[in-house]
Amino acid sequence: MRLPDARAHLLTNATADRYRRTLMDGVERVAARIATTERPFTGITPDRLAAEVGAVDLDRPLGDPLAALDELENVYLRDAVYFHHPRYLAHLNCPVVIPAVLGEAVLSAVNSSMDTWDQSAGGTLIERRLVDWTAARIGFGPAADGVFTSGGSQSNLHALLLAREEALAAVALPRAEVLPRLRILASAAGHFSVQKSAKLLGLAPDAVVTVGVDADRRMRPGALHRELVRCRERGQIVMAVVATAGTTDFGSIDPLPAIAEQCAAAGAWLHVDAAYGCGLLVSPTRRHLLAGIERADSVTVDYHKSFFQPVSSSALVVRDRQALRHATYHADYLNPARMAEQRIPNQVDKSLQTTRRFDALKLWMTLRIMGADAIGALFDDVVDRAAAAWDMLAEDPRFEVVTRSSLSTVVFRYLPTGPGRVHADAVNLHAREALAASGAAVVAATKVDGRHFLKFTLLNPETTVEDIAVVLELVARHAGHYIDRVTTPMLACNAR
Ligand SMILES: *Cc1c(COP(=O)(O)O)cnc(C)c1O
């Protein structure tokens, strides 16, 4: 390719027209695909798709966007998993709101980087406004601050880094002596990023202590109290209690006021992981479920879960901005200390990342076009739908359903009767796989007390009660076929 041709692909003042045409071609392609998606997934196997992707010669460019889009149909668009389809009921993936997609297109074209003011200007101020806005929704005071991150896992890691440093600063002993004594208390229903963070933070292998839960999978304050006492007796230092406001599996919300009370008494950092439950911050009817969150030291919010934002969009918000200093480093080439003295707002002073996307713009466009109440109403819809799904399952003798979620998950399993009963685990595993392979619907799987269960995570307001009923029939049918196979000796023989 000659140099002038290559330059024609750069987005510059000379190529604005090409940018417009190319993007329109892409938008047309995606719009057509989204409008005509009949199933959430085609059920293609990794091997078959790998052959298509592997056959592309990356050293032979097609030159033409339309040709590349045609090829993209085969390697991606045709077989992608579509979260906007009403029978995608699996993980914490939301359909996205159009204002946020508009923000995404703008932010990647302008390509601001959020590390320093001199790479973003207005982007920095917009992100700060949104952090302040979120902090106010949480109920934090004027000392609050925070930063956007890539996701809940990173927000949790960041929070626990701050908590670790605060704990280390509070005891006048060498770090090496204190580190192995640090403990994090979290319930078993908490997110695995807490364990990963503990490892990254150099804590002991057994640093994360599991606190017992009640029948609704919420942390028991009595159990928390016992673990706090036990840690103290063993000479361990509780650097953080992680409460979850919306557990990934059960949508359960730990009793925040009682936990905050104990953290205050024990002098422990309270981190509230609201990666999933943050949608309640804008719910017109359910904000009270987060009562007590304002007493946290740090909060994780994932806008890309319950604010209907495209990946990625998350934030860590802290009650007292002083804590953010633990991630502050100055570099002559980027953010020399004198800039802070001049009060030049450099977000890198608070962030674990350096070059960073202007993800905040998506939420900004969402709030400016739709508003917070509209987002909250969408989230309320899916929470209502999950309650209806739970009722439906509770009345259906073919299924067993566990704890009623405060949010939008439903954990259940098909319960075979008679001789099939011993195969309950395998039946549910099979039903999920067969359903995904058919592409008719996608549901998730998890384990409850060692047994295999299925899970709906509802985040699409377009999913109707009827959709849910249809998916349950499909689950029952796949389960029935499997039971027939394993309990009919002839058929079992043939299957082998
Ligand atoms: C999804 C989730 C996370 C992790 O967030 P990512 O954005 O996937 O990194 C953390 N905590 C909870 C409770 C979650 O549901």
Image (cartoon, rainbow, N blue to C red):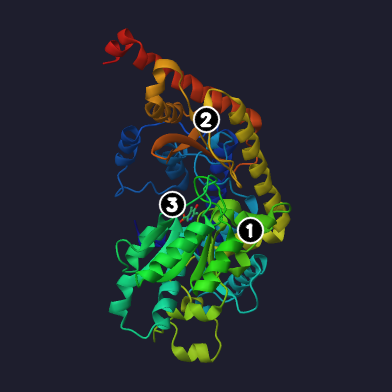
Measured from the top left, where is residue 369 in percent x and y? 71, 57
User: Dividing the picture into quarters, in which one does residue 418 lie?
Assistant: top left
Name which residue type carries label 1.
Answer: Leu
* Residue at horizontal 65 percent and vertical 31 percent from the top: 465
Please state if 337 lies on the left or on the right of 137 as rendered.
left
Compared with residue 222, is residue 429 higher up or lower down, i.e. above or below?
above
Mark 1 closeness class: few <14, some 14–19, many ≥20 residues within 10 Å: many
* SS at badge 3: loop
Mark 3 closeness class: few <14, some 14–19, many ≥20 residues within 10 Å: some
Does residue 17 appear in the picture of this structure? no
Query: Quick one: 94 or 474, which is closer to the camera?
Result: 474
* Residue at horizontal 41 percent and vertical 73 percent from the top: 164
Please state if 381 lies on the left or on the right of 215 as rendered.
right
Discs 2/1, front: 2
Discs 3/1, front: 3
Dot placed on the residue nearer the N-terminal end, 3 or 1: 3
Where does label 3 land, which residue? Answer: 188
Where does label 2 land, which residue? Answer: 400
CA distance for labels 3 and 1: 20 Å
